Amino acid sequence: MSENTLPSRTFAEKLDLLAEVAVKVGLGLKPGQELLMTASLDSLALARRITEHAYRAGAALVTTLYADDESTLARYRHAPDASFDHAAKWLYDGMGEAFKSGTARLGISGTNPALLANEDPDKVGRANRAVSIAYRPALELITRHAINWTIVASATPAWAAAMFPEETPEAALAKLWDAIFFTSRIDAADPVAAWKTPDAALQQRAAMLNEKRYSILQYKGPGTDLRIGLADNHLWLGGGTTAGNGIYCIPNMPTEEIFTTPHKERADGVVTASKPLSHQGTMIEGIQVRFEKGLIVEARATRGQQVLDKLLDTDEGARRLGEVALVPHSSPISASGLVYLNTLFDENAASHIALGQAYSTCVRDGEKKTPEELAAHGANDSLIHVDWMIGSAELDIDGITAAGAVEPLMRKGEWV
């Protein structure tokens, strides 16, 4: 076979390769490790393939927690009002204990992006906050990269229908699977090896920005005029990372971003979203917010205003930034021309920011620091971490040094 001749594969073969890539590249799963996986019932086929590959890789035990859309809707339509302030703390405590013992974490993304669009925003906000509180101890181990973890995608009927409403259900599902296989590099001759070059490129780009040591990023574009100060002793990361347990993993598959921690008190100006945000089964569109000294003081959306308000009211840290990420407009996901209505994909199609919890690994020696020490460097603390996209072909970004020198970083969405 020549280098330019790609193998012809059946759907089953591609699905199997996606599972293999998730285990070998995304997780880097090691013999003897346990794996905790979450998935929807519509992702059962991929979950089963991942389970098989995990055991082939030597997993001691694979435990999968399945979610069901109809059961979720039943709660909103029939459960007593007080129930929306409760979460299964026992479950999240168990997940935290699993991570402390070294269990790997894999999430299969692919839920209905508008599942809760017609439900009471107050109940949605309360339920999300209850889960955030219960999951916090386990989430801290994720944000500190104490363990190896990854997120991969599975096409589902509801997600496909939302992306391709003009297609038949069968054609929509096929189109979405094709997009997932392409962006996950499953169409390459050797999908596992195909991840090495782009991963190295992201590492190189992050290293360049770590040498630059910019103090401020300045964004200008349609509806956006924003300055973001970066955390003291911040670090840029991209692609894979070595977790605290010594295992190299790629947390997001696909991934096209490099990212770091902003200073929680150093964001000023206005920023406008370039893509809709699908958050916990609800859609928020046309987001525009204004920051003063790191805090969102005005926020509006053309759709989902109540959901946005509830999100920002989660806690004080929900109105501050926990992440800034740079993605060229020419990334393969952006070049596809698709709006995925799924943060795993859309955040890798455009530069973005995240409200809420900062990644401690994006502060030098952050994994060794206490929450108080991280806060002293400017890292934000919150129950949430929600990415939303601000990049486009019209966004310019400058890097500003501590001495005040302004250097072009991105022009029209592309690296200078």
Image (tube, rainbow, N blue to C red):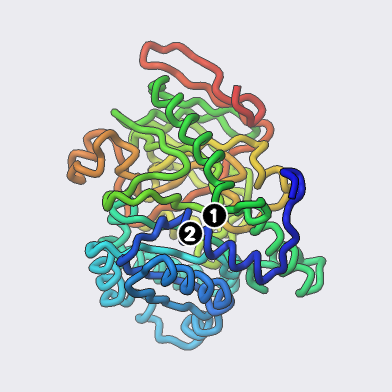
Q: Secondary structure at mark 1?
A: helix
Between 290 and 128, the one nearer to me in the picture: 128
Q: Which quadrant is home to the C terminus? A: top right
Q: Are marks 2 and 1 in contact (CB under 8 Å)?
A: yes
Q: In this view of the protein, which residue sits in the foreground, 43 or 248?
A: 248
Residue at the extreme front: 1
* Residue 63 vertical position relative to residue 272 in the rendered view, above or below: below
Please report the residue visible at 72 percent of the width from the left and 43 percent of the height from the top. 3
- Residue at point 41% right, 72% down? 55
Q: Indicate the amino acid at tag 1.
A: Leu
Q: Is residue 306 visible?
A: no
Secondary structure state at the residue bearing disc 2: strand
Q: Is residue 397 visible?
A: yes
Q: Residues within 10 Å of mark 1 (few under 14, many from 20)?
A: some
Q: Is residue 3 above or below residue 58?
A: above
Residue type at the position of mark 2: Ile
- Reading the chain from its start, which is encountered first: label 2 or label 1? 2
Left or right of 327, for residue 129: left
The spot of residue 266 in percent (x, y) is 37, 31
Around disc 2, counting alpha carbons within 10 Å, would you say few (fewer than 14), some (14 to 19), or many (20 or more)?
A: many
Side of 24 where 13 appears, left or right: right
Q: Which residue is mark 2?
A: 151
- Select label 2 or label 1 by which is in front: 2
Q: Please give the name of the residue rendered at 45% of the width and 73% of the height, measured from the top-left corner.
A: 123
Tell me how many marks there are: 2
Name the spot of residue 116 as percent of width and height, x first: 55, 72
Q: Which residue is mark 1?
A: 344
